[in-house]
Image (cartoon, coloured by chain):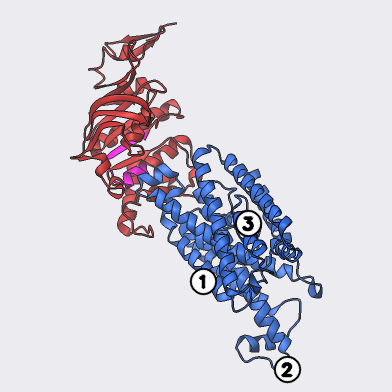
Chain colours: A red, B blue
């Protein structure tokens, strides 16, 4: 399923954050949203998840406008992994992944044998079998992040949105997280869209980059979309700093001191 | 499986304690006589025993069971809805809202004594105004919850709302008759013995409706554990859930407050005791466990309150903090 943004303007009533932007998130694609703090990355994710309305333009999901899709149906199309930490104690990993089945369970939320099969499948796909009986509060940040991804897999949504899934992780875990998401996109055909500050990681693993930010002297924030290779000339503009040089050949930033 | 066993044990313990509270009390009555009275055979030799069992022990035990369940479930719903372990009907000032509603009717309308001895019209009026008071405070808190970022701020806001309502109650007291003030003061100390046998079915019906409503919320409550955004993404209708939750909590708190007075700490402490017993936050098991633990604990408090014997009954609000306050300290220390 494709996500299409057409002349989308995001923000809050009386305060435009960014736009208009036009872009497409394709099936089986891992896309990384990059941009400085305050550029509107979270606002864009929140708008795509239908947590807040667009100010102008439209978001199309399949052949329909996002706002026209009933909440219940939307919960089977778009899954989210957010930055907010789950504070509750006493929820096991398996129960948490089971929450992803809520769009499919009955009024009382009882998991059927089929639901349970999906839960085990999701746990296996993310590789957290060993954690299944653990309580959420005993997990590390990286493990917790994987559980939330398994929750989204159990939700069986073709689209997964993640808000800074690599934040707070140590470097090996960041790499592991990006490779896991890349694998889910490519092997399961999920459209995965995530915001991140890990530029190097995104350049090496993402199929496409979405660059959001103010460019040049203009205050208006624009969105540029393309493969890392296609954006070679634009990247230095977006991440300009007197201490950064962009190596166009190897697609990486070098720091000079 | 372990959870189911815990719930069954809680149920058995509650039934046993309920029986104990019928068979024991400040006046000693032979077991066989009580069984006769309960079976409807009566006790012609001792009409006072019959009166004590029917008009005192049955209403008191049933009230304790129902109000304990109502306050505990209400506390659990509030803790989940506000995602705050220190939330509870008395902490957030919801029972003071109900208290103010009751005070308005009892003091201004000149209703002489407590709910138990009011006319049927007065009885309904007291419950209705308690409900409106509780719902008003809930509505204020829901608005504040959207504006306030931190947990502690919400608790402080709740305590402030509580202060304002108690000021208003004091102002009402100032203008009321001495009898009214005395009745309100007694009521404010909390008691399970104000309901008479003929009012009991109405009180029970209200609380049972509230408890039933809470069971309808099991699935959305579990989703709310993850926060509003995750819950919405899982297809839960947040606004509708919140409104229904507000009505349920308001009804449970208002009914129990109108019947027994503002009972402190039960709503706050019991959900934590239930979580500790189960080791689970899943409402499918936590809600029934909280309900039963609430009934059980309130029966214990009720039994303790009759301990002094002939000299009378200790107010419930003297006993509940002794059980509740350590639980709160434990929550704070554990965080």
> Which of the two marks, 1 or 2, is nearer to us in this view?
1
Calculate the distance from the C-alpha at mark 2 to the C-alpha at mark 3.
45 Å
Left or right of residue B121: residue B190: right
Which one is in front, A29 or B257? Answer: B257
Residue A245 location in percent, x, y?
35, 8
Q: Residues within 10 Å of mark 2 (few under 14, many from 20)?
A: few
Quarter of the image with the C terminus of chain B is top right
Q: Which residue is mark 2?
A: B45
Which one is in front, A12 or B263? Answer: A12
Quarter holding residue A188: top left
Q: Which residues are magenta?
A: A150-162
Q: Which residue is mark 1?
A: B205
Q: Chain of mark 1?
A: B
Q: Residues within 10 Å of mark 3 (few under 14, many from 20)?
A: many
Q: Sequence order check: which comes first, mark 2 or mark 3?
A: 2
Q: Which residue is mark 3?
A: B100
At x 43%, y 29%, the residue is: A167
Quarter holding residue B42: bottom right
Labels 1 and 3 within one chain: yes
């Amino acid at each position: 399923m494709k996500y299409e943004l057409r002349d989308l303007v995001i923000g809050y009533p009386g305060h435009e954050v960014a736009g208009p932007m036009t872009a497409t998130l394709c099936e089986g694609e891992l896309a990384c949203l990059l941009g400085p703090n305050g550029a509107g990355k979270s606002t864009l994710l929140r708008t795509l998840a239908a947590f807040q309305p667009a100010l102008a333009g439209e978001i199309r999901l399949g052949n329909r406008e996002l706002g026209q899709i009933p909440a219940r149906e939307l919960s089977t199309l778009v899954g989210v992994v957010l930055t907010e930490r789950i504070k509750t104690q006493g929820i096991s990993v398996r129960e948490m992944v089971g929450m992803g089945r809520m769009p499919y369970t009955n009024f009382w939320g009882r998991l059927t044998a089929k639901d349970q099969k999906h839960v085990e499948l999701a746990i296996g796909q993310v590789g957290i079998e060993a954690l299944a009986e653990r309580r959420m509060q005993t997990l590390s940040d990286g493990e917790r992040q994987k559980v939330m991804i398994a929750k989204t897999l159990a939700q069986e949504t073709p689209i997964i949105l993640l808000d800074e899934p690599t934040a707070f992780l140590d470097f090996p875990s960041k790499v592991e997280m990006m490779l896991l998401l890349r694998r889910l996109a490519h092997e399961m055909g999920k459209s995965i869209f995530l915001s991140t500050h890990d530029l190097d990681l995104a350049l090496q693993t993402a199929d496409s980059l979405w660059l959001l930010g103010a460019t040049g002297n203009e205050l208006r924030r624009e969105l540029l979309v393309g493969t890392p290779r296609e954006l070679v000339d634009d990247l230095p503009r977006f991440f300009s700093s007197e201490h950064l040089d962009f190596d166009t050949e190897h697609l990486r930033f070098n720091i000079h001191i | 499986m372990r959870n189911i066993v815990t719930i069954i044990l809680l149920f058995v313990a509650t039934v046993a304690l309920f029986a104990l509270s019928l068979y024991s009390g400040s006046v000693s009555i032979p077991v066989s006589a009580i069984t006769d009275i309960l079976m409807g055979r009566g006790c012609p030799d001792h009409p006072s025993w019959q009166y004590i069992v029917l008009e005192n022990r049955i209403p008191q035990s049933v009230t304790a069971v129902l109000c304990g369940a109502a306050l505990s479930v209400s506390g659990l719903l509030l803790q989940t809805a506000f995602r705050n372990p220190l939330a509870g009907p008395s902490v957030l000032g919801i029972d003071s809202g109900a208290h103010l509603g009751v005070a308005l009717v009892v003091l201004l309308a000149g209703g002489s004594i407590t709910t138990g001895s009011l006319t049927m019209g007065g009885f309904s009026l007291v419950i209705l105004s308690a409900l409106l008071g509780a719902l008003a405070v809930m509505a204020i808190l829901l608005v504040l919850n959207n504006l306030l970022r931190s947990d502690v701020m919400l608790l402080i806001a709740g305590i402030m709302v509580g202060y304002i309502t108690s000021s208003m109650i004091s102002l009402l007291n100032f203008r009321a008759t001495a009898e009214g003030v005395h009745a309100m003061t007694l009521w404010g100390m909390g008691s399970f013995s104000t309901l008479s046998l003929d009012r009991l079915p109405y009180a029970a019906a209200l609380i049972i409706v509230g408890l039933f409503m809470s069971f309808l919320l099991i699935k959305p409550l579990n989703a709310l554990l993850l926060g509003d955004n995750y819950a919405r993404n899982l297809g839960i209708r947040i606004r509708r859930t919140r409104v229904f939750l507000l009505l349920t909590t308001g009804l449970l708190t208002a009914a129990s407050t109108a019947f027994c007075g503002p009972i402190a700490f039960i709503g706050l402490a019991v959900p934590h005791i239930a979580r500790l017993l189960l080791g689970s936050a899943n409402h499918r098991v936590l809600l029934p466990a909280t309900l039963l633990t609430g009934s059980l604990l309130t029966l214990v408090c009720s039994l303790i309150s009759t301990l002094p014997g002939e000299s009378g009954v200790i107010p419930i609000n003297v006993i509940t903090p002794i059980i509740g306050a350590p639980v709160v300290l434990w929550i704070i220390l554990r965080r």
